Image (spheres, rainbow, N blue to C red):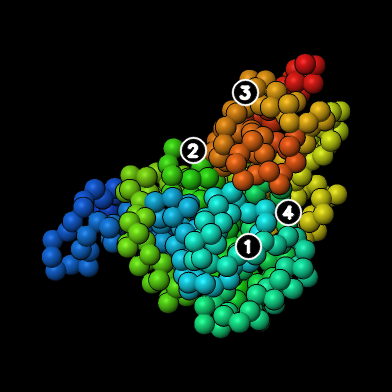
Amino acid sequence: MTHGDDRRTSLDPSTLAVHLGRPEAPGAPVNAAVELSATFRAGGAQTYGRDDNSTWDAFEVALGGLEGGTALVFGSGMAAIAAVLETVAVGGWVVAAGDAYNGTRRFLADAAERGRLAVRSADVADTDATLAMCEEVASAPNRRSSGGMLWLESPTNPLLAIADLPALIDGAHGLGLTVAVDNTFASPLLQSPLEMGADVVVHSVTKLISGHSDVVLGAAVTRSPELIEQLRTRRSLHGAVPGPMETFLALRGLRTLAVRLERSQASAADLAERLMARAGVSGVRYPGLPDHPGHKLAARQMRGFGTMLAFEVSGGAEVAEAVCQSVQLITPGTSLGGVESLIERRARWSGESHLPPALLRLSVGLEHPDDLWWDLDQALVRAQAT
């Protein structure tokens, strides 16, 4: 995308999401093509389909432009997470959010069990405690030779805790640790960890970015030329490559991210307020609520409070499961960020025993908020009547 004298040099991210990564030559198609080829004629820049694809390039230009770095698309969010964590040397330390995505925690537990990494879990909403743990890790006898990383989420999944990203990033860097931020819940339109100093950002592109629950993809974004080459090597050697059609669909989804986010976020705020006043709901977690512990911090470092909320129901796990079985419009199922609203009791999953048993995670989609409230209300009535 060029910026001549007759074009604004500072475009809103919602505009960039629509325009970045499009062909611009006269006569070119408006959309990037789907390149379906496993190999390429010798003599050009592209060689083989595990390393090069122009459909990847278009998506990476768009996402990288929004995050303010160079992006690499991966075959899944877990592939991107694994590639970033694999940049830590054998025996290196990782301090990770205790309320991080289940897949991240399972990867770290497996790596720790095999002796691949040394792992500590932190409450990233507690800045002082997290940095104290980072200092302890940084002074470990083998840290200088094996390195270390602070792995952050904010908001966390699914407890919606808010980490002070600038303070944690600066503090970790002062201790010689690299910092990765999973920005899936916020998306690049609501939060910019690279601008706050993070070394690398990861996304489950499956979620908000693609937005239609029809692809499985991931991405990593960094400003470091050395790190991007390490990640590129990991992608190729591990075979963690995306399909061109999936990447095309993710790019198409990215084009509408701003308008989807605006609608879903407004509905999430509305539902959070209604749930707060609803009998039988014992607690609501949404950073946009003034009584959320991280509300002021989220307002300072984010450009919105997001599309995810969590709430607890009175009566325990049995009632929470009954709510999921009683919804008629909202879809009971895992994942998030799609056009359809999804609900699930997170503690039902292996590895989530630390969560409140009656906690329900709600991904708010594009349905009308009055319809979503009707469905939640009738489900609560049915569940709590049994």
What amino acid is labelled 4 in the image? Ala
Residue 42: x percent and y percent?
Answer: 13, 65
Please report whichever mark, 3 or 1, sits nearer to the chain's N-terminal start.
1
Q: Residues within 10 Å of mark 1 (few under 14, many from 20)?
A: many
Name the residue nearer the viewer: 78 or 114. Answer: 114
Residue 212 numbered tag: 2
Quick check: 97 above or below 33?
below
Please report whichever mark, 4 or 1, sits nearer to the chain's N-terminal start.
1
Q: Quadrant of the C terminus?
A: top right
- Residue at point 55%, 40% (across, down): 335
- Residue at point 67%, 61% (across, down): 121
Toward which corner of the image does residue 176 lie, by quadrant?
A: bottom right
Residue at which label 4 appears: 161
Residues at discs 4 and 2 in contact (Cβ within 8 Å): no
Residues at discs 1 and 2 in contact (Cβ within 8 Å): no
Please report whichever mark, 3 or 2, sits nearer to the chain's N-terminal start.
2
Please report whichever mark, 1 or 2, sits nearer to the chain's N-terminal start.
1
- Residue at point 38%, 72% (across, down): 229
Q: Is residue 163 left or right of residue 14?
A: right
Please report whichever mark, 4 or 2, sits nearer to the chain's N-terminal start.
4
